[in-house]
Image (spheres, rainbow, N blue to C red):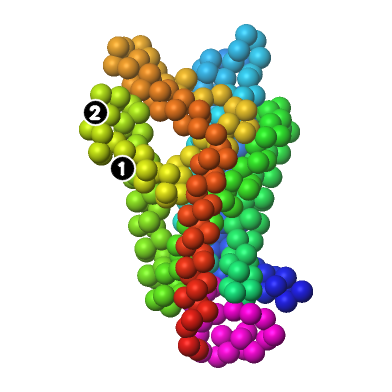
Amino acid sequence: MQIWAIIIDSFRESRDRKMFWVMLCISIIISLTMICVSFEPGRVNFFFGISEFETDIFTVGHQVRPETIGAVVVDFILDLMMNRIGIIIAIIATAGMFTSMLRHGAIEVLLAKPMSRSKLFFARYLGTLTFIGFHATIFVGLTFLVMGLRWGAWLPGYLLAIPLIVLLYSYLQCISVLIAVVTRSSVTAIMLTLVAWTAFGGVQLVDDLFTTFPQWQRYQTVYTTARTVRWIVPNTADIGLTARKWAGTDSVVEFMPASTDQEKSDRDMAMRVETARLNVPTMYTVGSSLIFELFILLLAMWRFSKQDF
């Protein structure tokens, strides 16, 4: 009960922050914007038909293909608004939750309760996850209903994006928590977490370049190092692709123009990278990332347990 009470208290604290309502407004605005769009064979209507754009991308035969609509939603709307902007907002909103707990006066009250420091630490950590879990549920739930009710694209697998968004946030939140415990500075936690996120993406980009240009793999030392580091750090770049795979949508690479030899070459390279990522079992990418997260959390918990308050 004590752990549950701390989780609820953490969620209430996040709810009192302005970022909570900013993310909620973003979810509602995007959903309302999606309602203004409709898909018909051979065209897309905007603002309830006031404007239209002729395209065959979403049409197969004489019907609109739901899997193609889902690909656009996952790769552009979900990936941009929740997996990028939403995660940044969540990191900013929750970075102060650990530092506020460590302030003199607040920490003494919590430590006075009959609960070990490790339980207090993990309860607070789970409390921060409820923030992104709530907003991921609202965003994915609303966009799922719009796709189904408005566009006729019912994709149940799209709902699995909810735990994936929470998973992506947890990869970064463990870094934020460790920095917050060490420095007791929210600003430092935010900045270094974003730096770490950029570094994780950079490592995966380097590895993708070796897949794109196989001839580079002759630099065995660099190639092996890039592959090894990629499996050590969280695979943040694969979350969007996993969401699309679980939703059963089409590949957006197929939409790339290919009227010239250069465009065909670019599309082939992009397809090669995507295929290589899809061939890696999700349990491997998620498993290695969770091992990294667990290590960072145990390190942060150890530091929290050893601190004098």
Look at label 2 and name its amino acid. Arg
Does residue 211 lie above or below 130 as drawn?
A: above
Taking 220 as reference, is 172 left or right?
A: right
Residue 221 position within the rendered picture, expressed as x and y whole percent measured from the top left: 25, 38
Question: Counting other residues with Cα less than 10 Å from the Cα at mark 2, is it few (<14), some (14-19), or many (20 or more)?
Answer: few
Q: Compare residues 212 and 280 and report the one nearer the observer.
A: 280
Residue 35 in view of the camera: no
Q: Is 70 placed above or below 21 here? A: above
In the rendered image, the vertical position of residue 27 relative to residue 220, given as above or below: below
Amino acid marked by disc 1: Thr
For label 1, the crowd category at 10 Å Cα-Cα, with few meaning under 14, some 14 to 19 and many 20 or more, is few
Residue 170 coordinates in the image, percent (x, y): 54, 56
Q: Which residue is mark 2?
A: 218
Q: The N terminus appears in which quarter of the rendering?
A: bottom right
Residue 75 seen in the figure: yes
- Secondary structure at badge 1 equals helix
Residue at point 50% right, 74% down?
302
The mark that comes first in sequence, 1 or 2, is: 2
Q: Is residue 96 magenta?
A: yes
Which residue is disc 1 drawn over? 225
* Residue occupying the point 70% across, 73% down: 3
Residue 230 vs residue 104, the one in the foreground:
230
- Gap in Å between the C-alphas at discs 1 and 2? 13 Å
Residue 118 point in image, percent of width and height? 59, 74
- Tell me the residue at 56%/24% (across/down): 250
Q: Which mark is residue 153?
A: none
Q: Which residues are magenta?
A: 95-117
